Image: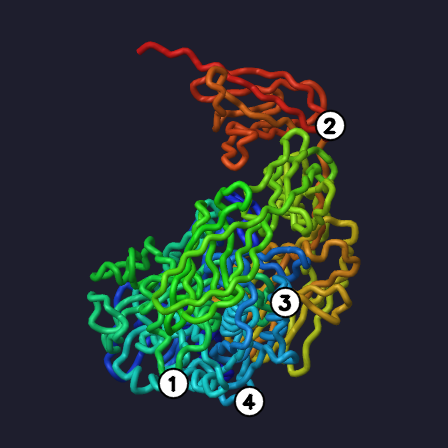
Amino acid sequence: MSTSPPARSAATGFRILGRGVVALGAAATLVLLGGLPSAQAAQASDSPHVLAGTPTAATATDATDATGQNAPTRLEPVCGTPGRDRATCYAMRAADATPVMRLSATATPAGLGPQDIQSAYSLPANGGAGQTIAIVDAYDNPHAEADLAVYRAQYGLPACTTANGCFTKVDQRGGSSYPQPSESWAGEIALDLDMVSASAPGAHILLVETDNDGLENLAAGVDRAVALGAKYVSNSYGRPGDFASDLSTYGASYDHPGVAVVAATGDNRYGVSFPSTLPFVTAVGGTALTPAPDTARGWTETVWARDPYGPGSGCAQYQAKPDYQKDSGCTGRSVSDVSAVADNVAVYLTYGAGGVGWQRYGGTSAATPLIASVYALAGAPRPGTSPASYPYAAGGAGLNDVTTGTNGTCSTDYLCHAGPGYDGPTGLGTPAGLAAFRSGPHGTLSGTVKDAKSGKPVAHATVGSGLDVATTDSRGAYQLDLPAGTVKDLTVRAFGYTSSAPATLTVADGQALTRDFRLAAIPREKVHGTVKDGSGHGWPLYAKVTVDGSPEAPVWTDPATGAYELSLPKGADYGLEVAASLPGYEPVEQTVTVGGHRVGRNFTLNADPDSATAVGYTLQREGTTETFDSNTSAPQGWTVANASGTDNGWEFDDPIQRGNATGGSGSFAVVESDNWPIGPHQDSQLISPVYDFSGSESAELDFKTAYLYNPNNQRMSVDVTTDGGTTWQTAWATSSTSGDGRDHRTVHVPLRAYAGDKAVQLRFHFVANWGYYWSVDDVYVGTRDLVPVSGGLTVGTVRDGRTGAGLVGATVADSRQSDATTVTVATPDDTAVGDGFYTLFVAGPGRHTLRVSAPGHITAYRTTKVRADRTVRVNPRLKAAPATSG
């Protein structure tokens, strides 16, 4: 990354640059929760064999993500297009998602977390002890260890630090002369570390940071990782295309028999990428992972594809076909081998412009360290063998076959379309336990798990011996692959049952054993209470109550009283998670201890002042706007702080007559790094007055801005302090897209994390070394509070008067208030309420008449007495409209 000034246009002075859960039930509300322009970027002296079909657009428009939450509208590559003999990282960031810097200890980050990944792939909860997994990446992430600590603490994983020997960071020579930092690759490093932690929490992690993203240096990093004892090496990077010189130039560094070397297939859809093309490397594709609580597995998968991105695949004709591959549509090396989730995983990152805390990441960079971890969980590879061949030798055992989805178009269908058996985008499939990722003899154990008293099947029971785990289906049946030899501590566990006594089995190679289990149910006790509004109205709420970690269906409160009751096994603590059916309320979680008596536990849910969508509330905003009217100095209460060596900082007189392109008018604040005689080096802070947010539910920042962004030479962020500037937290930063130019843009930054603080200050921080510029105007800082509107709720179901069937899509409205209207919905998860359910807020206590209508039915009117801050039940029945003659 050169710091020398780029060429400038003599005419303009501007530089000339190219542009580059655990799932909580069938419909859980709360879930425990870069791209390259084809191979033409790969330039080499010998003629490349490049597969066509890689798109180059940069916008995705998926409507939902892998957890059912609203998906971000755009994914962006963390790293840019690689130059000659260079690689790019394959991490993808959800660009339009709202990042969160701080979370409470009990909060769950958005996106898939360790419990989700372990559940989806039948991985042990604390596996990896005694193993070291290496991650090879370019450049340095100075915050790697600190951010890793936050990720692991948030999910309750054991600490992994330099001090306790779990975490080691080295340069490509094995020392501590770390390379220069990179904001782009810092995101890749954070993703890799978090995915290893999620998949193998007990493993040690070795991070090898190479001098830069040159292929020679990355190859040296792999050699260094193996020399330091790693048996599992993850490489989440690549260079598009297949070249005749790849094997002779770099192949030896990735060819380590007895070591599982894995590499990402890329994020550019159909087309291959080095080093995943090498025949002794496990090539990892990507899937989208979706909760499916009603299935035995609990998850479904398809090919990950968000236009224009998806996993790479294809036929590497310059690489010989390995003996273990038998597909007939490619004479060379087929890509990929296996796959794993490549979308919507939670990651924590604080370094650089993209370091804004909790975010959602994806790409085959997420799948690759996960597969490396599964190899580690399965145990050390046999000396002299190629671990890439293990999944092929398993004959389908230990793999989830992904059969739907595509990553593009191709002449050989299976190389770009998922289907039964082997296919290009997902390979042989995703992990279903560890059997497919170990070598050596093995056998199978199958049987059923039933209730010892009733004889009924026990679904969702786990049968395992520590590392190898299987889950029973709805019939209580299971099948478990086990290594040949003596298997100790085989145990069966199920929610609500006493675990079986540990058993010891002897398994011969190829042997099929059968063993049934009977589990004793644990006596249960009732937990009951109410769920109500906690933001002023106090009315009962229709809500879902889910037990953390329980496979049993959630319970729902009574819509009119807010009452609930559930039965839980005695002698344990349980996390109860409560989410309102009404939009605009924040879910809560509390722990209850179930002993020998009924437990009463009430919940209050607060309306969210940031979304401000809860019925019966109006949003009150109070704040001030700074317009920077003076062009001679910083406004009163604002200060400019320039670091030593800064040539110039924030100014207010438009020093090069750029003009106000923020969307504001008149004077504005600007910091320049782009034009003579402005100096090339800036580290300047525009610091706000102190704001008092005490007593407020939330706070916010809005500002108008214009900028031109260079990710390699410039950083822009809005940071927050509550201790007078001793520490700062990033609340907003620009994207990492090269050449990102924005003008007439209004930025909204939630400051909910600082509600209640008495001394909050903001800074607009610009750091550049021959960067561009940043201008700001009309900075609004204020509080957000919800104020109750006098009125009450009416709830009920609308049914057909003859059949009693619920009418979905019926309209319920207050005949006197045009804006008081709602539409009935289906409630498939709550049979006690039934379809045709509605909730209507009516302003003003007293008698009101409801107008109820539905297609094909006669409109009815029902009079009810609305009570302030109360919920009343009205269940209208509509008569069918008489048939009309033709």
Residue topped by disc 3 = 150
Residue topped by disc 4 = 175
In the image, taking residue 714 as reference, residue 508 lies left or right, namely: left
Q: Is residue 555 shown above or below 138? A: above
Label 2 environment density (alpha carbons within 10 Å; few <14, some 14–19, many ≥20):
some
Of mark 3 and mark 2, the one earlier in the sequence is 3
Of mark 4 and mark 2, the one earlier in the sequence is 4
Residue topped by disc 2 = 868
User: What's the amino acid at mark 2?
Assistant: Ala
Q: Position of residue 865 (x, y in %)?
A: 69, 20
Label 4 sits on a secondary structure element that is loop
CB contact under 8 Å: marks 4 and 3: no
Q: Position of residue 498 (x, y in %)?
A: 60, 52
User: What's the amino acid at mark 3?
Assistant: Val
Label 3 sits on a secondary structure element that is helix
Label 1 environment density (alpha carbons within 10 Å; few <14, some 14–19, many ≥20):
some
User: What's the amino acid at mark 1?
Assistant: Ser
User: Which residue is at the front of the view, 664 or 29?
Assistant: 29
Q: Position of residue 249 (x, y in %)?
A: 32, 87
Taking the spot 28% from the left edge, 60% from the top edge, the residue there is 416
